[in-house]
Image (cartoon, rainbow, N blue to C red):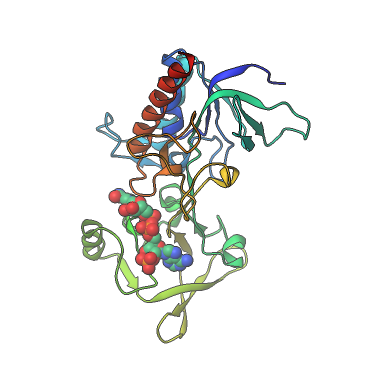
Amino acid sequence: MPSEIRDVIIIGSGPAGLTAAIYTARANMHPLVIEGEPSSTSDQPGGQLMLTTEVENFPGFPDGVQGPELMGLFRQQAQKFGAELITEKVSRVDFSERPFKMWLASDGPDAEPHLAHSVIVSTGAKPILLGLEAEQRLFSKGVSTCATCDGFFFRGQDIAVVGGGDSAIEEATFLTRFANSVTIVHRRDELRASKIMQDRAFANEKIRFAWNSVVVDLDGEDTLQGAVLQDTITGERRTLPVTGLFVAIGHQPNTDIFRGVLDMADTGYLVTQPGSTATNIPGVFACGDVQDSVYRQAITAAGSGCMAAIDAERWLEAQRH
Ligand code: NAP
């Protein structure tokens, strides 16, 4: 039954949340991190890097580092300075007055909320799915949203990636390490991905393209046997014989519990003031992918987590004087 009022509660435990935890812990703010829950593809919370294998572009690791290992190090560093972590999800918030109130998913209707003078929101984003019934049925049975987690299982197979952005091209390129062929299924005849990524894909002889095509159904009961494609111009349908389908059509920020509370864009991303992590509610800060639809890198998330910690610390200090 929580009654203590924390200086800061951090919601979420990806690179943004745990960096905020390291900084606020070192500033003697005794942060509580409500870190979220394990996902279907990871036995620990820790954000999207928990679904990643090799991370090659995080500075300080010239030989690369595994995503879960990197998040383990973040966690260890936050705990070393006294951050406390709870492996639960926040299900409800009340930011209408201070101290701010947060309830956990496991709390009963009469549970006492967790209280804090300031809050750092770092709940991240999750991959968007196609919305097909068969996609749910065959999820983890051929359908995946994480090439780096599941690519290994498709050694020597013919597989497909849906999408035309940087994620799709990155996933497809990575998957050619394992697969016999990778078909990029894109709804237009032009990729959205950056030029350098496009060039990489066009030069890769294992990558093929199904232009002007959308996936309308999937074949297979217990394992994926094929993707039914519809031509967006002629309406014709054909089955692409693939045993793996990686959906890479963008991400949805995890902001449902903040709807009507914190300002957000039409896309659901939280809005922060330019050059700051401040939200529309003084004392509530947002960092990482939950407020960043552009860069979405572990290092930018970590950087904005540091900003949120400093913003929260200075804001609290100003309140006290
Ligand atoms: P994105 O840029 O929004 O691309 C999403 C792709 O999926 C688009 O090609 C879109 O088609 C397609 N799409 C969306 N909804 C669809 C649907 N229902 N059915 C079929 N196709 C659909 O998302 P992203 O690739 O995840 O990238 C997001 C951001 O992260 C971007 O800023 C990107 O540059 C960045 N990023 C960078 C890197 C890197 O630099 N290494 C890697 C990954 C991501 P349309 O093109 O027709 O809209």
Q: Is residue 285 left or right of residue 221?
A: left
* Residue that sits furthest to the front in the current view: 321
Q: Nearer the viewer, residue 210 or 193?
A: 193
Residue at 63% across, 31% down? 102
Confirm whether residue 244 shows in the render. Answer: yes
Q: Nearer the viewer, residue 316 or 171?
A: 316
The picture places residue 316, in percent across and down from the top left corner, at: 47, 19
Q: Residue at x 42, y 50 (%)?
A: 152
Tell me the quadrant of the picture where the C terminus can be found.
top left
Q: What residue is shown at x 43% (from left), y 40% (from top)?
A: 49
Name which quarter of the figure residue 23 lies in: top left
**Percent x, y for residue 173?**
31, 57
Q: Position of residue 116 (x, y in %)?
A: 58, 23
Residue drawn at the location 44% of the way across and 23% of the way down: 315
Q: Is residue 132 above or below residue 273?
A: below
**Ligand 1 quarter of the rendering:** bottom left
> Is residue 6 depicted above or below 226 in this figure?
above
Picture coordinates of residue 188 (x, y %)? Answer: 35, 73
Q: Is residue 22 visible in this depiction of the protein?
A: no
Count all numbered tags in the image, as a single digit.
0
Quarter the N terminus occupies: top right
Q: In the picture shown, does residue 31 fall above or below 134?
A: above
Q: Is residue 177 left or right of residue 91?
A: left
Horizontal arrangement in the rendering, residue 211 relative to residue 236 (left or right): left
